[in-house]
Amino acid sequence: MHEFRVTKYNPQFRTPRGTYSRSEWTSRSDIGRVYEGVELTLAEYQRVEDAYLGAAAAFLSEAQVAQVTVCGLELALIDYPPVAEGEQLTIEQLREALRGVLREEFWCRFEADNAFVHVGYDYRRAAALPQGPSCC
């Protein structure tokens, strides 16, 4: 089994116990705030967000996954998410739905028979992994 983890956090700043030692942004709501002397701009946020979307799509493409199922849908900031529990999404549709998850508008997992994409709550991870049967 292969596991791919994506993180924007530089491993050089992890302590031997795995704690991250720098103050960095964790959310779209941090745009305009200063971290380690650098302001998070909309352009930088979008660059990182687009890199996460591209990585997820590339992992799924490599695993030959054409569509994923929305599982475990939870509402956060919006009343009507652009996806529904059990809905099948193409990889292109996944990119836009994943954007909403990264922006903390709602949360869900995206699963297929042989892979999945799960996102942590603060840009800690996004992964596409071979796995067993889908949850839905």
Image (cartoon, helix red, strand yellow):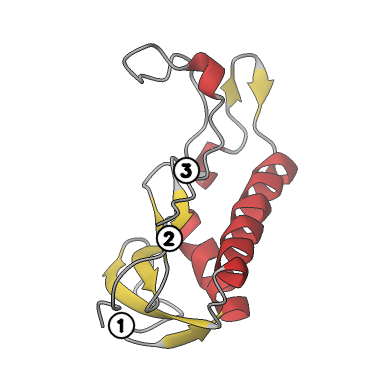
Circle 2 residues within 10 Å: few <14, some 14–19, many ≥20: many
Q: Amino acid at mark 2?
A: Leu
Q: Amino acid at mark 3?
A: Tyr
Look at the numbered disc 3 and give the secondary structure of its residue: loop
Spatial CA span between label 3 and label 1: 23 Å
Task: Indicate which disc, 2 or 1, sits on the residue closer to the N terminus.
Answer: 1
Task: Indicate which disc, 3 or 1, sits on the residue closer to the N terminus.
Answer: 1
- The residue located at (47%, 43%) in the rendering is 123
Label placed on residue 85: 1
Q: Amino acid at mark 1?
A: Glu
Task: Indicate which disc, 3 or 2, sits on the residue closer to the N terminus.
Answer: 3
- In the rendered image, residue 118, in percent from the top left (x then y), is placed at 39, 58
Circle 1 residues within 10 Å: few <14, some 14–19, many ≥20: some
Look at the numbered disc 1 and give the secondary structure of its residue: loop
For residue 34, which quarter of the picture? top right
Look at the numbered disc 2 and give the secondary structure of its residue: loop
Q: Which residue is mark 2?
A: 129
- In the rendered image, residue 94, in percent from the top left (x then y), is placed at 53, 74
On the rendered image, what quadrant is the C terminus found in?
bottom left
Pick the residue in front: 118 or 49.
Answer: 118
Spatial CA span between label 2 and label 1: 20 Å
State left or right for residue 6 relative to residue 118: right
Q: Nearer the viewer, mark 3 or mark 2?
A: 2
- The residue located at (66%, 59%) in the rendering is 54
- The residue located at (30%, 78%) in the rendering is 134
On the rendered image, what quadrant is the N terminus found in?
bottom left
State left or right for residue 101 relative to residue 9: left
- In the rendered image, residue 45, in percent from the top left (x then y), is placed at 65, 44
Circle 3 residues within 10 Å: few <14, some 14–19, many ≥20: some
Q: Which residue is mark 3?
A: 123
Spatial CA span between label 3 and label 2: 17 Å
